[in-house]
Amino acid sequence: MTLKNLRSKFIISLLFGMAIAVGLMAYGDFSDIYGSLEDFRWELMPLLLALSLGNYLIRFVKWHFYLGQIGVHNVPKRDSFLAFFSGLGMVITPGKLGEWLKSYLVQEMHGVPFIRTAPILLAERFTDAVALLLLAGAGFFIFGEAWEVFVIVAVGSVIAMIVARHRPTMRAILRRAERLPVVSRFASQAEVFYDSTYILFSPWSLIFTTILSVVSWAGEVLAFYLVLVGLGQDGSWTLLVQAAFILPVATLAGAIVLIAPGGMGVAEGGITGLLQAIVEDMSKSTAALATLIIRFTTLWFGVIVGLIALAFTMRRLATAPPADQPLGVALATGADSPPLIAASAEEREGQPAGGADQGETLQ
């Protein structure tokens, strides 16, 4: 992945998201959606955005906790905050891989090797998946829907945790990977990557961060519930349980399909379909509009906040370049650069700060 490719993927994902929105409006009928839009209780919108912002802030706490877990203590909270929120701007890239931008920014600001913090994204995705599974747990038994998602995520989570914490297995995997032509270049980095992964997947770390994830995603579920109430549904415990099932399941389905940018298309289809299947008297137009509103407040609002944070981060990098490492002009100028993962290899080989070409991000 290069910075130039990341930008192009973002633009493609943005256009894809716009197409999804138009498709949903066409499915629900433009005139019916417009009528429902006028009836929506817009006084709820500030609360919806506040709940999403609360979700982001709790996830930032998790990110900063992870940095401390792997021994990165030289990153001030301000810079950690900027890096994390900048990553939100890249959540619409396929598999959310663009969120690795925050590891790159931490490297640029404080010289922490990219490969050392990169496993944090894996731990974040893992604990988010477990939290969503827990929130949706009751619904799997009550509604009897989406068992495939439950099985895939549950089994995958258990396997990932066991493998990550079993050193002999991981060492064997790394030794085999070293024989591959491309992977062999990063053999030494793989050891660093796994060392961080092993720490992040420790029982205490997983328990604490999963609790944080449950709390943060519960806010998103509450926001979805309020969207349904704002569209005329009667507020009840039943509706809250339905919301706590539909949103997590659709989000998990979108996460499983890695090629879907930010889960787009899959998540929207899941939310719209499950609303009509589970919520009584749910019309196509109301289901489509509810999907559009919750995806704006939980996905696109985060992208907007992330892009604003990225602008501040770029200003910080431009005015105070790190003394021990080249600034990484390519991020600001859009110049092409080698894969991001190659950065820490050079750094670990002891490349002097001034030895890199200032026209390239990473050599």
Image (spheres, rainbow, N blue to C red):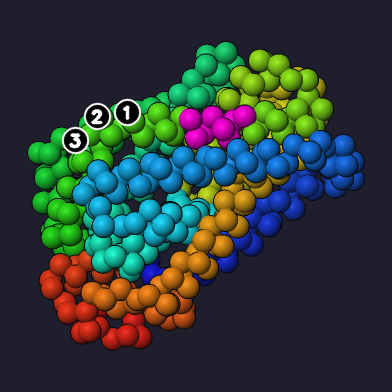
Which residue appears at 26% of the width and 30% of the height?
204
Which residue appears at 18% of the width and 59% of the height?
189
Can residue 181 be seen by looking at this rendering? no
Q: Is residue 147 above or below residue 84?
A: above
Q: Which residue is mark 3?
A: 165
Q: Is residue 356 left or right of residue 308?
A: left
Can residue 345 be seen by looking at this rendering? yes
| Relative depth, front residue between 340 and 84 | 84
Q: Is residue 335 above or below residue 229?
A: below
Which secondary structure lies at badge 3? Answer: helix
Which portion, as a residue range, is magenta?
215-222
Q: Quadrant of residue 225?
A: top right
| Relative depth, front residue between 44 and 92 | 44
Image quadrant where one finds the N terminus = bottom left
Q: Which residue is mark 2?
A: 203
Disc 3 vs disc 1: which is toward the camera?
1
Disc 3 vs disc 2: which is toward the camera?
2
Q: Which residue is mark 1?
A: 207
Q: Dot 2, how many residues are within 10 Å of its Cα: few (below 14), some (14-19), or many (20+)?
A: few
Q: Is residue 266 left or right of residue 114?
A: right
Q: Quadrant of residue 202?
A: top left
Which secondary structure lies at badge 1? Answer: helix
Which secondary structure lies at badge 2? Answer: helix
Which residue appears at 37% of the width and 64% of the height?
105
Amino acid identity at mark 2 = Pro
Q: Earlier in the sequence, mark 3 or mark 1?
A: 3
Q: Earlier in the sequence, mark 3 or mark 2?
A: 3
Amino acid identity at mark 3 = Arg
Percent of width and height locating residue 197: 23, 44
Real-space Cα separation, disc 3 to disc 2, in angstroms? 9 Å
> Is disc 2 in contact with disc 1, using a CB cutoff of under 8 Å?
yes
| Relative depth, front residue between 2 and 360 | 360
